[in-house]
Each structure stands twice: as structure tokens, then as C-alpha cells.
């Protein structure tokens, strides 16, 4: 069976690292199985969905390295959902209800006080034609519920009805349909809740594996029943744990917390985000994985923990540093060229500075320091100035290599009696204008004798 997965965000905000986890679980699953990846926008809620968000989600996925084979919008597919509604109505599996939310709440409390499960009691099924006509005459519109198959012949006498599936992530799962209310599929105003369109699309698009957050486990019980009611075989399901911040808070699209867009704008490497999004909360240790194919090799959905995965946003930065500090020149080359870092020195330069970068783009400042000198002119006290005068007067002769620094500073120790920080720091400041940076032994050959002399204060 060829594999088709889907990632189904509602375009109501920017996707965050938790959404990226869902997208990547699907993407890596497809990658490992030679499958297809569908991006489905769940935009049936016209008031909250925005094209701008859909566009950004596409860009964010592209940035992460997730490239959909197909993109669909639920807002363009209402006719298909209407047909499914007709089918369910014909089969007597979708019934109209007129309760207000206050009424439902009141009944819920009564059931709880009677120690009954707080599920919908299907009172609407008892309405006579006259009562229904009276509601219609008042201009009230019904919402529509799906009749769960959790009874033998009398819908008011439910019985334990287990739905089982072998979850790709969580292993064998059981949901009891008698513990749930009949789900509302269509609202009073005729708009669709998520439940039905998702099933209809999963059928029509030939989705073989639905991989999503574990907040959908209960939905899956109801949705499997809907698949069957529509005459389809349900796909396989996988429910991964959700990400929370260190304090246990969930992430929300609406707050923009840790959005993929903001991470990209900060200059974080996509694979730093992907590594964390995929490996956190699994049996694998979290480390910086440089390519998607290596990440796929480490991706084992069944090894995902069942409890929420707490993560510290600072981890993204640490992974990012590791990726940059180990990035081969060939991989960085084009991006360096775009920063104006080009020419015969570019490779040596990259190998010398990469270990000091927070972001790849920071290489531009170091390029300028190496080529032009310190970004800000340094002020030295009289003593340091005297020391530097001696230092620059005693620069070793060319040719220069990585041993030049030691030869120079050994000679300066002898000449001036300085050692340690008082020896190195004025030199570092004079050469780079910064207190920290690449090894001066590596940097010196890049500056060359002439370039070094030009930095004499
Ligand atoms: N739009 C739904 C969500 O974001 C999709 C859930 C699913 O993958 O079925 O939660």
C-alpha cells in the first residue's frame, strides 16, 4: 500500500514549533515510506481563517524543508461535505437538535448529580414532528448530531462499544463510544465543525495514515465510526504527544509563541528547529541533526513518549550553534556568497570563524573585521599602547602560518614580561576590536602581515 499522509492546520495564526512537530512527523513518515504528503488547510471557519496565514504556513513548511505534493483548501470543498451530510441523513445517522447551550449545560448538571455520565442524552430524537415544526416556525435552525453506533436497537440504551486501533505512535488504543456524546457535525448556521470535513477529505484524498496530536485521540473514536458510516475503511492513526513550555503551558497559534516565522527571522537554522521538534519527547536524545534524511533515519514514531514533552526554547539556540559550528564550507558557501563572503580565502575564513557564530549571518561582521579591521576603533591606556607599539614592531617575518601567533607572543613574553590576559587581550582588541572571537593563531594568517600592521593603534 502506498502511503499518503496529510498535515491539516487551520490558517488562524502562524504555526509554531508544536505544529512543526505534527508536520514533520508526517513528512518523515512519508519520507521513510516513499509516500506522498498533502497539505490541507482546515479553513471552514471563514471568520477566523486568513489567506495571509495560509500563505505563511506554506512558506514556513518550505523553510523547514517540508514540500507538499498536494495542497487543498477545505473552503473550496463544501459541496463534497454537503453530499456526505445528505448521505448520513438518508441513513438516519444525522439528526437535528434544537437545544441551546444553556439547556445542554443544565442537563449535563442533572446527569452529573444523578451520577450518570455527562453525555448528550439524545433528547432531540424524542421530538415529535409537531415539536420540530414549532421550532422551525419560530425561525430556529437545528444543529446536527451524528448518531454514534453505541447501542443495539434502542438509542436510549447505550452499551459499551469499543473502537480499537493500533496507533502508529501510541500502540493499541481503545475508545468506548458509549462514553461520548453524539458529535455535532453541522452548526445552526449551516457551517461545519472540523469532524466531518476531515473524514470526508481523508477518504477522498486517499489518506492512509492520519498522524496528529494526542488531543485528537477521542475524536478518532468518533471519526472511525463516521468513516464506517460513509462506507469507507478508516486509515491508520498515530497520535503524538504535544509540546509544552518548561512551565507546562501549551503553545498557541494565536499568541504567536515560538512561531516558525519568528525563528526564521531570528536566523535560526531550519534543521535546529526540526531536530528539536522531532526528537524532543522521544526515546532519542535531542541533538542537532544536519539533514532531513539523517533525521528520518532517527525518526521512530513508536518510540515517542505518551506524556507531554516539555521543552526549553533556549534548546533551539544551542542546537543552532552546534549546526553552525560543524557546518561544512560546501553547505555554507552559497549563503556566504550572498553575504559578500567570496574568494580564495572564503573557505579558510569559514573554518576559522564558524565556531564563534550564533547565526550564520554573523559571519558578515567577522568578514568585515578580517578584511577591513575592527568595527569600532579601540582606545588603549598608555601602558597597553606602549606594549602594542613593541608588539607591532616585533611582528615575525613572513611567511605566516598557524604557528606565527605562538612565535610572536613567545617573543613578546620575553621582551615585555607580560603574560596571560594582559598579553593577549590588548592584541586581540587591536586586531579584532572584540574581547572574544576565533583563535588568534588561526586568524593571524588570514590577516597577513600587512593586514596586521594596518591595525597598529
Ligand atoms: N485542523 C485540525 C487541527 O489543527 C486537524 C486535526 C487533524 O489532523 O485531523 O487540530
Image (tube, rainbow, N blue to C red):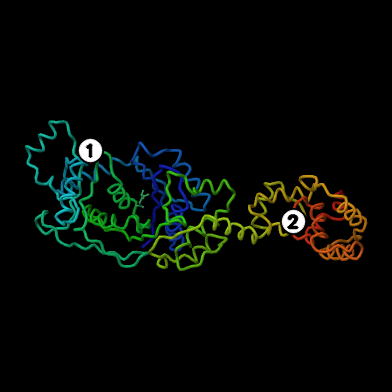
- The structure residue drawn at horizontal position 82% and vertical position 56%, both measured from the top left corner, is 427
Q: Position of residue 399 (x, y in %)?
A: 88, 61
- Asked whether 80 or 152 is in front, the reply is 152
Q: How far is mark 2 from mark 1, CA to CA?
A: 66 Å
The percent position of residue 219, horizontal first and vertical second, equals 28, 54
Which residue is drawn at the image coordinates 74% and 54% (left, top)? 435
Does residue 174 appear left or right of residue 114 in this picture? right
Residue at figure coordinates x 83%, y 49% from the top left: 380
- Is the CB atom of the residue marked by disc 2 within 8 angstroms of ligand 1's nearest atom? no
Q: Which mark is residue 188?
A: 1
Crowding around mark 2 (Cα neighbors within 10 Å: few <14, some 14 to 19, many 20+) is many
Picture quadrant where residue 46 is located = top left
Viewer-closest of 44 and 447: 447
Dot 2 or dot 1: first in sequence order is: 1
Give me the disc on residue 309. Answer: none
Q: Looking at the picture, how far across and down is residue 365, in whole percent?
A: 71, 48
* The N terminus - image quarter: bottom left
Q: Is residue 76 left or right of residue 184?
A: right
For mark 1, give the secondary structure.
Answer: loop
Instruction: Determine whether the residue tagged by mark 2 lies in a helix, strand or loop.
Output: helix
Kindly identify which residue carries mark 2: 349
Q: Is residue 12 visible?
A: yes
Q: Residue at the location (48% across, 43% down)?
A: 56
Give residue 351's quadrant in the image.
Answer: bottom right
322 lies above or below 204: below
Amino acid at each position: 500500500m502506498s502511503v499518503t499522509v496529510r498535515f491539516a492546520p487551520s490558517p488562524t495564526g502562524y504555526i509554531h514549533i508544536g505544529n512543526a512537530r505534527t508536520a514533520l512527523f508526517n513528512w518523515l513518515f512519508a519520507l521513510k515510506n516513499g509516500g506522498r504528503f498533502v497539505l490541507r488547510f482546515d479553513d471552514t471557519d471563514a471568520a477566523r481563517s486568513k489567506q495571509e496565514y495560509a500563505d505563511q504556513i506554506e512558506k514556513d513548511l518550505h523553510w523547514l524543508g517540508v514540500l507538499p505534493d498536494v495542497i487543498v483548501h477545505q473552503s473550496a470543498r463544501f459541496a463534497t461535505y454537503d453530499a456526505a451530510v445528505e448521505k448520513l441523513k438518508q441513513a438516519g445517522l444525522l439528526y437535528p437538535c434544537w437545544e441551546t447551550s444553556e439547556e445542554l449545560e443544565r442537563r449535563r448538571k442533572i446527569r452529573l448529580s444523578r451520577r450518570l455520565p455527562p453525555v448528550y442524552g439524545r433528547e432531540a430524537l424524542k421530538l415529535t414532528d409537531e415539536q420540530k415544526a414549532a421550532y422551525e416556525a419560530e425561525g430556529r435552525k437545528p444543529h446536527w448530531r451524528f448518531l454514534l453506533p453505541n447501542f443495539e436497537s434502542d438509542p436510549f440504551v447505550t452499551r459499551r462499544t469499543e473502537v480499537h486501533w493500533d496507533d502508529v505512535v501510541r500502540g493499541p488504543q481503545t475508545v468506548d463510544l458509549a462514553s461520548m456524546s453524539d458529535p455535532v457535525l453541522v452548526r445552526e448556521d449551516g457551517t461545519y465543525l472540523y469532524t466531518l470535513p476531515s473524514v470526508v477529505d481523508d477518504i477522498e484524498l486517499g489518506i492512509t495514515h492520519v498522524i496528529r496530536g494526542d488531543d485528537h485521540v477521542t475524536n478518532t473514536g468518533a471519526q472511525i465510526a463516521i468513516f464506517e458510516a460513509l462506507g469507507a475503511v478508516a486509515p491508520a492513526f498515530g497520535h503524538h504527544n504535544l509540546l509544552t513550555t518548561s512551565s507546562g503551558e501549551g503553545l498557541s497559534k494565536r499568541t504567536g509563541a515560538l512561531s516558525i516565522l519568528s525563528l526564521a527571522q531570528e536566523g535560526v537554522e531550519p534543521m535546529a528547529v526540526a531536530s528539536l521538534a522531532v526528537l524532543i519527547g522521544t526515546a532519542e536524545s535531542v541533538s542537532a541533526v544536519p539533514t532531513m534524511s539523517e533525521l528520518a533515519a532517527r525518526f521512530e514514531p513508536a518510540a515517542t513518549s505518551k506524556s507531554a514533552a516539555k521543552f526549553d526554547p533556549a534548546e533551539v539556540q544551542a542546537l543552532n550553534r552546534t549546526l553552525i559550528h560543524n557546518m561544512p564550507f560546501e553547505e555554507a558557501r552559497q549563503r556566504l556568497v550572498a553575504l559578500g563572503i567570496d574568494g580564495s580565502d572564503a573557505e579558510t575564513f569559514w573554518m576559522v570563524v564558524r565556531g564563534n557564530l550564533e547565526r550564520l549571518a554573523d559571519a558578515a561582521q567577522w568578514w568585515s573585521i578580517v578584511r577591513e579591521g575592527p568595527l569600532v576603533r579601540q582606545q588603549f591606556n598608555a601602558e597597553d599602547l606602549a606594549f602594542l607599539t613593541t608588539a607591532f614592531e616585533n611582528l615575525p617575518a613572513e611567511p605566516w602560518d598557524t604557528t606565527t601567533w605562538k612565535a610572536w607572543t613567545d617573543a613578546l613574553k620575553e621582551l615585555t614580561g607580560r603574560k596571560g590576559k594582559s598579553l593577549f587581550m590588548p592584541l586581540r582588541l587591536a586586531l579584532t576590536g572584540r574581547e572574544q572571537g576565533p583563535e588568534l593563531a588561526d586568524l593571524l594568517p588570514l590577516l597577513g602581515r600587512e593586514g596586521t600592521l594596518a591595525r597598529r593603534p
